[in-house]
Every structure is written in structure tokens, then in C-alpha cells.
Image: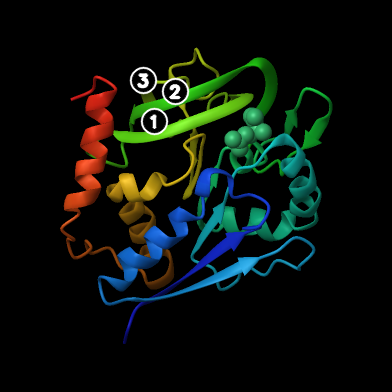
Amino acid sequence: MKLKLTIGHMYPDLLNLYGDGGNVRCLEKRLLWRGMEVETVSFYVGEHLDLSGVDILLLGGGSDREQAIASRYLLENRKAIAGYVEGNGVLLAVCGGYQLLGNYYRTENETLNGLKLLDIYTEWEPKRLTGNVILKTSMASMPVVGFENHGGRTHIGRYRPFGKILQGFGNTGNSGYEGVLYKNAVGTYLHGPLLPKNPELGDYFIRQALRRKYGIRAGLAPLSDEAECRANRYMAARCGQT
Ligand code: GLN
């Protein structure tokens, strides 16, 4: 039997700032390179969201304007998304998508209702938090390298963060932590091609999804990841983390 995972990409035309969709391409490749099958299903606003066949779900980031549109449609599908996350579905929610997992996002002009999957909240401040980020997470042995650009500050209370900041701003600019980790859901401010530069993270999501779908606990066949690790090391060194 060939193993197969289905990737769900939510609102790729609306929430895809800085190429967050590159994370989908990365997961597809890492599955195919190992002889597994993969199918990607894109969900668009206004469509009924059926996550019953989805193994990994990606929710990207967007501007405040795009988030305002997305939030309306997300809320219509709250039950499906909450059921998926509570049922240990693997979710990567980036920046604007991360903010919308919480209770609300108060922008400069309005308050957007969040999905209330997590008891966290985000409030806008005029100084944008922008730049390269390096963090340490329990999900990878290498440092995680990425890029952030957000006006919102996310307060995660007692939840587990995704990582500890070595360089950059993270959730609030002064908490010392970045993102959130809940069951198999990760919310993070790290934008764009996060998984290609951090191959261990991509494999973490794949392992969790295989475990949930097939009960498989075995490790994954190693890939060379030479270019990926070089990109990671280059960014870490550029930020003074060697
Ligand atoms: N609009 C949100 C903010 O500025 C999220 C931005 C993003 O997804 N980059 O905080």
C-alpha cells in the first residue's frame, strides 16, 4: 500500500503573502521524494469547508484588508476547523492566519472576530515588527530561520510557544517567544518559504500527519537536504547565530 497524505490549502488567492504557498510545494516534494502520494486541495472563500479527508492544513497570512475578508468566511466554517484541530489535525497557520486562530485581532480601525480555537488575542500597534527571525524550537535540532512583518502583537497566555526567540521580535516584541503550539497546530509569524529553509519542520508535520492517519510512528527516510541546510546555515550566520 502506498501511503498518501492530502494537503488542504485555505484561501490561496487571499492569504498568500510573501509566498506562504511555498510551504505547500515543500511538503508535496518531501512526500514525493520518499515515494509517498500527495494530493493538494485548495479551498476558496464561499466554499463549504470539508476537512474530513485533509491531513495537513495550511492557512497563510495577509494584510489587514485581506484578513477582514477571510475572517468572515473562516467564521462560517468554524465548526469544521475546530473539529479538525481538536481531532489532532496538522495545521500550519502563518501570520494573519495565526492571528485569526485566536479570540480577536484588533486592527488600527476595527476588531476582527477570530475563530476562538485558542484563548489568545492580537492587538495592533503602530510600530511594525519586521525583519529576520531565528528561533529555537523543540520540533527541530537546527535553529529555525524565517522572516516576520506584522503590526499585531499576539498574547498567548499560558499556551506553549512555537519557539524561543534568538533574534527578532516574535509574538509581542518583548515576550521572548514566537508563535504557538497546540496539539498538532502551529501558529507562527514566520512568513513565506518557512518549510524549505527548515526541512526538519516540514518533516515534523509529515510525521504527525502519518501518525494521525495511519498510526505510523517510524521515522522518515532521510533526504539529503544539502541545499536546504545550506540556506538555513547561511541565514543563521547572517544573523550572528552560528
Ligand atoms: N495584517 C497583520 C498584521 O500586520 C498580519 C500581517 C501578515 O500576515 N504579514 O499584523
Residue 159 in sight here: no
Is 31 placed left or right of 65 in the picture?
Answer: left
| Helix, strand or loop status at disc 2 | strand
Q: Nearer the viewer, mark 3 or mark 1?
A: 3
Image coordinates of residue 42 in percent, x first then y, are: 61, 67
Name the amino acid type tagged 2: Tyr
Check if mark 2's residue and mark 1's residue have beta carbons within 8 Å: yes
Amino acid under label 3?
Answer: Gln
- Rendered location of residue 241, percent (x, y): 23, 23
Quadrant location of the N terminus in the rendered image:
bottom left
Which quadrant of the figure has residue 94?
top right
Secondary element under disc 1, as helix, strand or loop, is strand
**Coordinates of residue 155 in the picture (x, y in percent):** 60, 23
Residue 110 tag number: none
| Distance from Cα at disc 2 to Cα at disc 1 | 6 Å
Q: Kindly tell me whether residue 4 is visible in this rendering.
A: yes
Q: Amino acid at mark 1?
A: Gly
Q: Which residue is mark 1?
A: 163
Residue furthest to the bottom in view is: 1
Pick the quarter of the image with the C terminus.
top left
| Depth check, front residue: 43 or 85 | 43
Rate crowding at label 1 as few (under 14), some (14 to 19) or many (20 or more) other CA atoms within 10 Å: many
Residue identified by numbered label 2: 177
Disc with the residue nearer the chain's start (3 vs 2) = 3
- Crowding at mark 3 (Cα within 10 Å: few <14, some 14-19, many 20+): some
Which labelled disc corresponds to residue 167? 3
Mark 3, mark 2: which one is toward the viewer?
3
